[in-house]
Amino acid sequence: MSIAFGGVVALDRVDLAVADGVIHGIIGPNGAGKTTLLNVITGIARPDTGDILLHGSSIVGLKANLIAAAGIRRTFQTSLLCKGMTVLENVMAGLHVKLRAGMLAAALGLRAVWRDEQDAADAAHAALDYVGAGALAERDGGELSFGQQRIVEIARALVSEPRVLLLDEPAVGLSPDRVTQLDALLRRIRDDRGVTIIMIEHVIRLVVDVCDRITVMSSGRPIAEGTADEVTRNTEVIEAYLGSALNAVDRRA
Amino acid sequence: MNRFWRLMLACLLLAALLPLVADRYTLFVGNAMLVQVILAVGLNLLVGYAGLLAFVNGALFGVGAYAVALLRDTLHVPYWLALPAAGVVAMIVGVTVALPALRLSGLYLALATIAFAQFALWAFMHWDPLTGGPSGIKVLPIEFSPLPISSGLGFYYLSLLVAAAICWLTRNLLRSRIGRAFVAIRESETAAESMAIDVTRTKTLAYALAALYAGIAGGLFAPLLGLVVPESYDLFQVVFQFAMVVVGGLGSLAGAVLGAALMVWLQEGLRAFKDLQEIAFGGLILLTVLFLPGGVAGLLRNRLGWREPLRRPVPRGLMRPR
């Protein structure tokens, strides 16, 4: 897969290519345009110029729901699970376009609709088990902790069997134990399911450990790209971002 | 069978047996409750589930009532055809209003729809050749002549049948992907889009259903009252409808049913104090919002631990043979 942009206000001639089936980290100081980049990819924001290609076909200008239907799913920096639905129903909502029931068929409660619903429930249970949140299935989406919500959000994205998964700071609010579990989960998603993951993250330990490639952004521009080793040794990166981030980690330790 | 269904069946049974003990007045009140149940279910879909703060339902209730009056008593279309037609007319009007209003949200949507409600009221009042102006249109009661039942009793059971059917269809809809899409756009349009839910389409659907239900309710209300006059569809009707869904419980199907029954009962109790009604219903909305945010349904949910179409557990591994 290749993604290319140019000339977005918050993003200045960003040219990014993400290989299929890798975990690609995006790091950088606040305001570097990382979330804007995800918003542009998912169709929430529109680039002024430039193009976005998914497996060679342009998705720029498509409505956000169509981009999601094409197999690009995301999670949010501030979790957006729905209250008033169970966690399971939240995950089932991720299957919206895969369930094709029309209004009339659904209203009449036709057998085929009910069967699809049960399949969806089974798939949602499986996705929750997969991310290790199976026990939360019957809780209300609004009553989960911040960390639990982010994990369930991953299940909600995964249940639709996406080709690309975009994660916006999935480790925020997680305990060190949970970060380790997330690390293993991301590897499983990549290795078992072949999903390409693009992840914005400030928890450097996780990024360095799990990402196959890392892009460093600053002021709307990518300033370096490479493997974890290459990036952490790049002096420009250390000055712009990593220095302060690593110091912060040291101070906390 | 869970508690939700037991309660709904108890309501249905009670409603079905009411005519055995009721006098004409009580039967009329029961019938009015059934009409309001249909309205409340539609409004709760729109406001409670899809989260669209729109005030179109009072006016569309009127559109349905006028449509039936004109179709049946002026053009002599049979009632069995005029009633669904009233629903379709209201739906067309509702969606026509909704399409520009869909770009708006929150306060702007509320204001735009109040403007429509006032415009509709003005049209009911002043479009004399069609609506009969302030004195309205007389509507003949529905006769069930081949069947050996009186007009009042037959109409009560017809209303019960329609109300029960609408509740059942709505419950099915809510527990499908469409119900989840409503809640998803209520909670966050951005998140809904990123789950591949078409927000505009889902909103339009919520409007269309609420309008259809309001039109059908209007089509039942006109012959029940025997008269269609503008003042039945003014802003008080809007307040009354919101009282039903807020007191009953926003985002709860059972809440809409209970709220409708409760509010009609209260309105009848306050018949003698006409001026007090608006204050009473406004105050009731305020008190519920402040002290009982989930409404009656929320109270029952917490006390009885019952489950509804959404918020229901789906057992795992319930694999069926294919």
Image (cartoon, coloured by chain):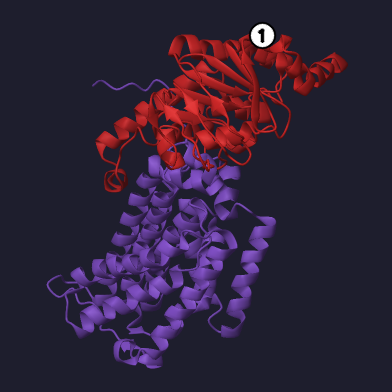
Chain colours: A red, B purple
Q: Residue furthest left?
A: B146
Percent of width and height locating residue A41: 51, 33
Q: Is residue B65 above or below residue B138?
A: above
Label 1 element class: helix
Residue flagged by tag 1: what amino acid is it?
Glu
Q: Taking the image as drawn, is residue A117 in sight?
A: yes
Percent of width and height locating residue B316: 43, 23
In screen coordinates, is B49 left or right of A108? right
Q: Residue furthest top?
A: A229
Quadrant in the picture for residue A123: top left
Percent of width and height locating residue A135: 56, 22
Q: Which residue is mark 1?
A: A230
Residue in the picture at 60% in, 51% down = B294
Residue in the picture at 46% in, 40% down = A64
Residue in the picture at 56% in, 32% down = A38
In screen coordinates, is B242 left or right of A100? right
Quadrant in the picture for residue B180: top left
